Image (cartoon, rainbow, N blue to C red):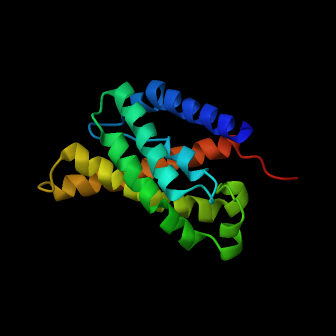
């Protein structure tokens, strides 16, 4: 019950941060870094895939309602949470998958964590940009926004993790 409340409060914090701060960061038209996928990166490995997807959809829907983006976040977060177990399977050893590991820089190390975050953000940003453009007719624009937003989001997540990550002494 305590763990559930911890994740609930953390999820609300990410929602409020995204609504009030991160959504206001717009380096240019169509450029929109996101921070909230970090919430899904930190879910325990043993968390059910279907529950992860339902949580992703609900979280994205709440974000869409607050930002007025009409389902963009719900769809892209659901897609990201759908592929997350497959990507985690690639980045975690069998022993790590059997424990209730919470992926993060402390448990995975910075390189593995950022690499995992990169692939998940790539999926998230692909669907977000595809749905926001609603067209494959502008492939260069889609590619630029997709890659650019992925790297901006990864830098933002790395910055936030770096600020709150404490090394063991």
Q: Nearer the viewer, residue 117 or 27?
A: 117
> Does residue 118 lie above or below 14 as drawn?
below
Give the residue displayed 56% in from the left and 52% down from the top.
41
Query: Residue 126: percent from the left, percent from the top?
Result: 32, 55
**How many tags in the picture?**
0
Query: Residue 111: percent from the left, percent from the top?
Result: 61, 64
Q: Residue furthest right?
A: 169
Give the residue displayed 51% in from the left and 50% down from the top.
51
Side (left or right) of 52 relative to 128: right
Identify the image quadrant of residue 33.
Answer: top left
Q: Nearer the viewer, residue 119 or 52?
A: 52
The reply to whether residue 25 is in sight is no
Query: Residue 130: percent from the left, percent from the top?
Result: 24, 51
The reply to whether residue 153 is in sight is yes
Q: Nearer the viewer, residue 45 or 142?
A: 45
Q: In the picture, which quadrant includes the N terminus? A: top right
Give the residue displayed 20% in from the left and 57% down from the top.
140
Query: Residue 2: percent from the left, percent from the top?
Result: 73, 37
Q: Residue furthest left?
A: 137
Give the residue displayed 36% in from the left and 51% down from the top.
125
Side (left or right) of 25 relative to 91: left
């Amino acid at each position: 019950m305590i763990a559930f409340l911890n994740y609930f409060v953390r999820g609300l914090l990410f929602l409020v941060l995204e609504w009030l701060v991160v959504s206001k960061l717009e380096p240019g038209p169509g450029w929109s870094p996101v921070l909230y996928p970090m919430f899904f990166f930190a879910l325990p490995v043993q968390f059910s895939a279907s529950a992860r997807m339902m949580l992703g959809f609900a979280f994205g829907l709440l974000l869409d309602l607050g930002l007025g983006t009409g389902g963009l976040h719900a769809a892209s977060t659901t897609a990201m949470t759908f592929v997350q177990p497959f990507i985690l399977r690639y980045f975690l050893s069998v022993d790590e998958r059997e424990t209730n590991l919470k992926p993060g820089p402390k448990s995975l190390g910075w390189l593995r964590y950022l690499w995992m975050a990169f692939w998940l953000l790539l999926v998230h940003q692909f669907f977000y940009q595809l749905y926001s453009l609603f067209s494959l007719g502008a492939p260069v624009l889609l590619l630029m926004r997709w890659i650019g937003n992925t790297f901006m989001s990864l830098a933002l997540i790395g910055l936030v993790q770096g600020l709150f990550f404490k090394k063991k002494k």
